[in-house]
């Protein structure tokens, strides 16, 4: 299960103006391009990203969509339609940005909305699409993009609305030291202190990245049972740092894996992200402190906990029939003695069969319900059109 993604970003992979940049300059290079998103582009991007994830064994995808230019005010509706064609479960987070360049934010004014419009649409998509209970295929969460892209009032009102309807809350936090410095300059608070001040330090919240926390903050996150979407590949591409996964987990925080957007990964492959999680954590911890089983746990039961799904995450009586199967007959696995370790260490990259809710969605490495070639053709055309 993928706890953090930006599916629209599949349209700007390996985009030359954004290469080799830190987070803030990277965003400033891409925002003007993303501002031109059209409905058919988002539909194509969502289908392509979900297909790629499904083929890598990913049965549930949490997508963080926060761009709502005038042409794309019904982005969540578009994603629900695309997801129904591919077959993954989805947690679609209704993101938001309300601080444009004129207000000291990073995004162009054309991509931001005012607080009232955002909150009204949040309420609409919850009522229209959010499914409660075991077996839910489509769920909605509320997700202001980050502390530097929305107002304090919006953070507070989003939390109130989410709790009124019983949906989860999501945002980026403590991804880079630049963000920490921004929060100190703007609010006089470190990111976690700001998060607590707006009512977000809670077990119904999960945070993307969560890298730059000190020891006291790790303890507070654990006490509050906050979830962390650990995004190894993205953190490496943008040189953001390494999440303190083991300390956070030991303190009581929930840890899951996120592939993150395909403009900072630049792929959407869940099983490869498991390997990346193991390897990046070996740079922070000793080899006997983090294992392939830890990485697999984060991708399954850990991610389920982060997303509040106690019906998913393990093969057990009473759980949902979401199953990814991998064939170990490839040359890369020849000579391997432990199949679970081989899956991670030898670099599995594609599932042979994937079942979601008891129905086969991938068989023999091929999508059951969709034509991947046709999806790719429309996606490539959309990507070319976007960057013109």
Image (tube, rainbow, N blue to C red):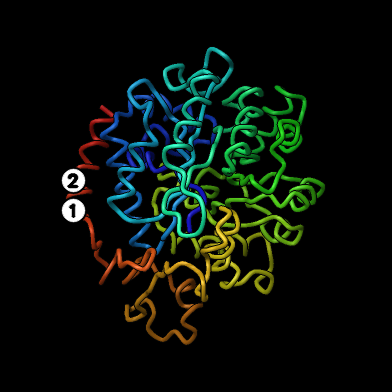
Mark 1 near mark 2, Cβ–Cβ under 8 Å?
A: yes
Left or right side of 181 for 366? left
Q: Residues within 10 Å of mark 1 (few under 14, many from 20)?
A: few
Which labelled disc corresponds to residue 373?
1
Position of 95 relative to 46 (above/below): above
Which labelled disc corresponds to residue 105?
none
- Residue drawn 74% across and 58% down? 252
Q: Secondary structure at mark 2?
A: helix
- Give percent across and percent down for residue 255: 62, 57
- Residue drawn 45% across and 54% down? 136
Q: Secondary structure at mark 1?
A: helix
- Give percent across and percent down for residue 261: 44, 44
- Give percent across and percent down for residue 287: 65, 71
Looking at the rendered image, the quarter that the C terminus falls into is top left
Q: Residues within 10 Å of mark 2 (few under 14, many from 20)?
A: few
Instruction: Give the Cα separation between the discs numbered 1 and 2.
Output: 6 Å
Quadrant in which residue 232 is drawn: bottom right
Counting every numbered tag in the picture gives 2
Which labelled disc corresponds to residue 377?
2
In the picture as drawn, the residue positioned furthest to the right comes out as 216
Quadrant in which residue 110 is drawn: top left
Return the residue nearer the eye: 376 or 124.
124
- Give percent across and percent down for residue 34: 38, 29
In the picture as drawn, the residue positioned furthest to the top comes out as 102
Left or right side of 286 for 231? left
- Residue drawn 30% across and 48% down? 48
């Amino acid at each position: 299960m993928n706890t953090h993604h930006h599916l629209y970003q599949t349209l700007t992979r390996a985009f030359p103006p954004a290469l080799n940049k830190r987070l803030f300059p990277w965003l400033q290079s891409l925002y003007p391009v993303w501002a031109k998103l059209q409905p058919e582009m988002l539909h194509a991007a969502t289908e392509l990203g979900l297909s790629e994830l499904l083929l890598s064994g990913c049965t549930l995808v949490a997508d963080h969509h926060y761009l709502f230019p005038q042409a794309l005010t019904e982005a969540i509706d578009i994603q629900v339609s695309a997801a129904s064609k591919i077959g993954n479960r989805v947690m679609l987070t209704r993101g938001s940005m309300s601080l444009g360049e004129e207000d000291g934010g990073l995004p162009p004014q054309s991509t931001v909305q005012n607080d009232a419009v955002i909150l009204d649409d949040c309420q609409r998509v919850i009522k229209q699409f959010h499914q409660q209970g075991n077996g839910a295929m489509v769920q909605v969460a509320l997700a202001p993009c980050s502390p530097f892209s929305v107002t304090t009032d919006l953070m507070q009102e989003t939390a109130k609305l989410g709790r009124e309807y019983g949906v989860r809350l999501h945002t980026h936090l403590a991804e880079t030291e630049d963000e920490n410095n921004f929060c100190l300059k703007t609010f006089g608070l470190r990111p976690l202190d700001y998060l607590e001040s707006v009512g977000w330090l809670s077990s119904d919240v999960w945070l993307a990245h969560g890298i730059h926390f000190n020891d006291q903050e790790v303890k507070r996150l654990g006490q509050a049972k906050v979830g962390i979407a650990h995004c190894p590949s993205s953190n490496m591409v943008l040189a953001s740092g390494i999440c303190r996964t083991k300390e956070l987990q030991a303190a009581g925080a929930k840890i899951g894996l996120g592939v993150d957007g395909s403009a900072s990964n630049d792929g959407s492959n869940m099983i490869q992200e498991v390997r990346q999680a193991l390897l990046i954590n070996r740079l922070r911890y000793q080899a006997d402190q983090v294992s392939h089983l830890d990485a697999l746990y984060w991708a399954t039961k850990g991610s389920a906990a982060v997303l509040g799904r106690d019906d998913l995450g393990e093969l057990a009586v009473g759980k949902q029939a979401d199953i990814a199967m991998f064939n170990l007959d490839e040359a890369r696995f020849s000579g391997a003695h432990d199949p679970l370790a081989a899956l991670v260490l030898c670099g599995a990259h594609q599932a042979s069969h994937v079942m979601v809710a008891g129905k086969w969605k991938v068989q023999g490495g091929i999508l059951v319900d969709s034509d991947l070639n046709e999806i790719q053709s429309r996606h490539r055309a959309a990507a070319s059109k976007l960057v013109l």
